Image (cartoon, rainbow, N blue to C red):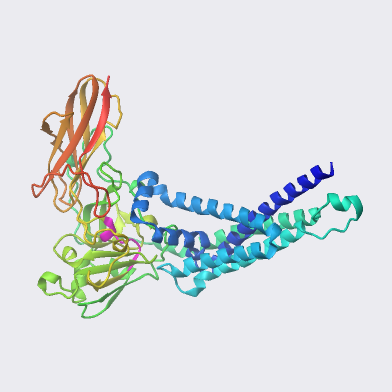
Amino acid sequence: MTTVRITRTALTRGTLAALSGLLAGFAALTVAELVSAAVRPEASPVTAVGGAAIDRTPAGVKDFAIRNFGENDKLVLQLGIVVTLALFALAVGALALRYRRTGSAAVLAFGVVGAASAVSRPDSTGVVDGLPSLVGAVAGAVLLYVLIGRLTRPRRIPGEEQEESEGGWDRRGFLIAATAAAAASTVAGAVGRTLNGRSSQNAVASREGARLPAPASPAEPIPAGAQLRVPGLPPFTTPNNKFYRVDTALVVPKVDANTWRLRIHGKGVRRDLEFSYQDLLDRPLIEREITLCCVSNEVGGPYIGHARWIGVRLSDLLKEAGVKPPSRGGKADQIIARSVDGMTLGTPVEDVMDGRDAMLAVGMNGEPLPFVHGFPVRMLVPGLYGYVSACKWIEDIELTTFDDYDAYWVKRKWARKAPIKTQSRIDTPKPFGRPEAGTVMVAGVAWAQHRGIEKVEIRVDDGPWRPAQLAEQDTVDTWRQWSYPWKATPGGHTLTVRATDGTGEVQTEKRTKTVPDGASGWHSVVVSVD
């Protein structure tokens, strides 16, 4: 009977020790969240460690995450970090039952890892970014030491009861300390989140107060025939809340437009320039219809969208700074655009200054940019994949050369130059759909930004290519809808699409992955006709 009691006591203490580790980890994170409110939200350990993990993740793994989790990839990463921390905390708690100081030291060590991650981030403001992780770790280590102390209280009961309470512990003291710690940690976390939320109020107010002036060069009206009335087709203009988002920011930057500044400097710049948000709004603005596409878009994928953008022509700003393209003797052949979160994108100077409508955008579909899409200002260059042209939350433009500097994605084995490939997609019928026999409308979109779409063709099974009916083209920088009335017969069929761009180049059949410069290949869907 005594042995059974000792075993149950040991099991209970072991479980509570693991729980102590979990409480210590929770305290470390919530205290760090509270301290980050005095530093900056991006310095919190989950964000810092998550950002560091993204920076060190191979391109293939990132591509896998985007392909399988889509825009939820950041949520999955954050959940993974929290689960990992929880498992680590449980193990540290169990360790601390036998090695009290070692367990507490392990919590401190993990705090050092978080601090190092925060300080090493591209957007780090210095060693102060490490404070939340360090202070949180100290709080967690102290709490673990105290709780384990309640579980390893020296025996005081002599005789048989002494044997039954082997490793006797202060049950009441443990419960009081654990309950108080859980309550205090919850309050600290709530206060930290509230304060961090308030820190973005100025940014929110600046966006709500922004008023976009009428463009000096408005976009032409979208042709009535650009939107086909076929069920299953996406709208020609993608609503802002439906527009795809692919970036590395775990916390969406909330930038106050009133304090935001943009600097232009570097090679071939005769004089550095600096602009405020209002400076840009006061300049002649252009308004253009432009389709954007992410390089992580698989064949037939969803990471493409169309919007009406308003902004300042980027080439005008560069000319004002004295910049010349390489074709005219300019010293720089690359623009490095830097975001407030430290992201760097490299864009060919020649492409920006060749007459296309490259811009620093301030508006999207008639309103100031949403925060997730770059408010207050983002860059975009028609015809180039976003990772080399569409810098969100931009704050710095440096003129340099491709030989001198590799931007963020280039360092991770993506191509330096990335013109968008000619692509097409079947939107209806859906894969594995079951349409009824008879006339079935096959429809989708095709794109080859800055070249336009000249022709789209459909093939049923291994039959001949048939021309699809094209919607009216808006501009060469926009996608183009198409449709094909298919006389469907019962049975299984494979529908395949290909496009020809405005230069006469036919979309290649060769399948390639998204790395290093975008996917290629024909999109097809398999259906069963009833």
The question of residue 456 being in magenta is answered with: no
User: How many marks are shown on the rendered structure?
Assistant: 0
Relative to 522, residue 134 above or below: below
Q: Position of residue 421 (x, y in %)?
A: 19, 50
Q: Could you tell me which quadrant the N terminus lies in?
A: top right
The residues colored magenta run 386-395
In the rendered image, residue 410, in percent from the top left (x then y), is placed at 28, 62
Which sits in the foreground, 117 or 277? 117
Give whichever of 174, 437 is nearer the camera: 174
Residue at horizontal 18 percent and vertical 73 percent from the top: 319
In this rendering, would 347 be left or right of 132? Answer: left
Residue 195 spot, x, y in % from top left: 55, 63
Q: Is residue 61 above or below residue 332?
A: above
Residue at left offset 17%, top offset 42%: 509
* Residue sitting farthest toward the left: 504
Does the segment drawn in magenta span residue 388? Answer: yes
Residue 527 quadrant: top left
Taking 113 as reference, is 190 above or below it?
A: above
Q: Relative to 130, is 465 above or below? A: above
Query: In the rendered image, which quarter is residue 282 located in?
Result: bottom left
Furthest-bottom residue in this view = 271
Depth order, front residue of 450/43: 43
Q: How far from the left and from the top, in percent, is residue 122?
A: 40, 68
Kindly tell me whether residue 323 is visible in this rendering: yes
In the image, 177 versus 270, the foreground residue is: 177
